[in-house]
Image (cartoon, rainbow, N blue to C red):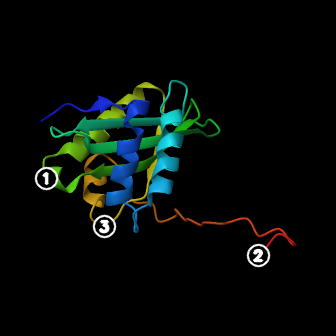
Amino acid sequence: MPEPRLATPADAAEIARLRSENILSQPLDQAWLTTCADQLALRLQDGGDARAYVIDSPVGGLATCALGLVHAVLPAPKYPKGLAVRIHAVATDPTHRGRGYAKAALAALLDHLEHTGVTLYELYASDGSAPLYEQLGFAADPALMRMTRFPAAVEGNAS
């Protein structure tokens, strides 16, 4: 099996593609793919908050990615450095599935993050991906809730 490698800003477009094609309920159009790739490239630079491990496809591009976004939380005994990560995307191109690539990339990402002081890991799992995450130590949390809010239109500016 190919070894996962730490992603660089040059991998951002492929990571955005894998996320769009394999995770999102509706793939992104080209404008959104470009926006995501540009932002991710900045965030993958040294000092940025994104960390990813990838496996290259032998035919070009990426076969798999595991992307985490590191953020600060208030320190506590379980997270003394005050670092947490949201695993944002774990995706494998369909032609490379069933080879253990996602597990290898995610395990490499988790090891990397552990060595940088991250101790709190969060993710949203589909029914199909939950067994992989459970194998790596994740557990379901019935208390986790989610909401999306958009700013209300400013009066007078609504069209």
Q: Quick one: label 2, few (<14), some, or many (20+) residues within 10 Å? A: few
Quadrant of the rendered structure where residue 9 is? top left
C-alpha distance separating marks 1 and 3 = 17 Å
Q: Earlier in the sequence, mark 1 or mark 3?
A: 1
1 and 3 marks in contact (CB < 8 Å): no
At label 3, which amino acid type do we have?
Asp
* Secondary structure of residue under mark 3: loop
C-alpha distance separating marks 2 and 3 = 40 Å
**What quarter of the picture does the N terminus occupy?**
top left
At label 1, which amino acid type do we have?
Gly
Q: Quick one: label 1, few (<14), some, or many (20+) residues within 10 Å? A: few
Question: Which tag is nearer the camera, tag 1 or tag 3?
Answer: 1
Label annotation for residue 98: 1
The image position of residue 32, as x and y in percent, is 50, 55
Residue that appears at 26% across and 41% down: 61
The outermost residue toward the bottom is 159
2 and 1 marks in contact (CB < 8 Å): no
Instruction: Give the labeled residue for mark 3.
Output: 127
At label 2, which amino acid type do we have?
Ser
Instruction: Give the labeled residue for mark 2.
Output: 159
Question: Which tag is nearer the camera, tag 2 or tag 3?
Answer: 2
68 vs 152, nearest the viewer: 152
The image position of residue 85, as x and y in percent, is 49, 42
Q: Is residue 48 placed above or below 37 in the rendered structure?
A: above
* Secondary structure of residue under mark 2: loop
**Left or right for 27, reference 105:** right
Q: Earlier in the sequence, mark 2 or mark 1?
A: 1
* Secondary structure of residue under mark 1: loop
101 vs 21, nearest the viewer: 21
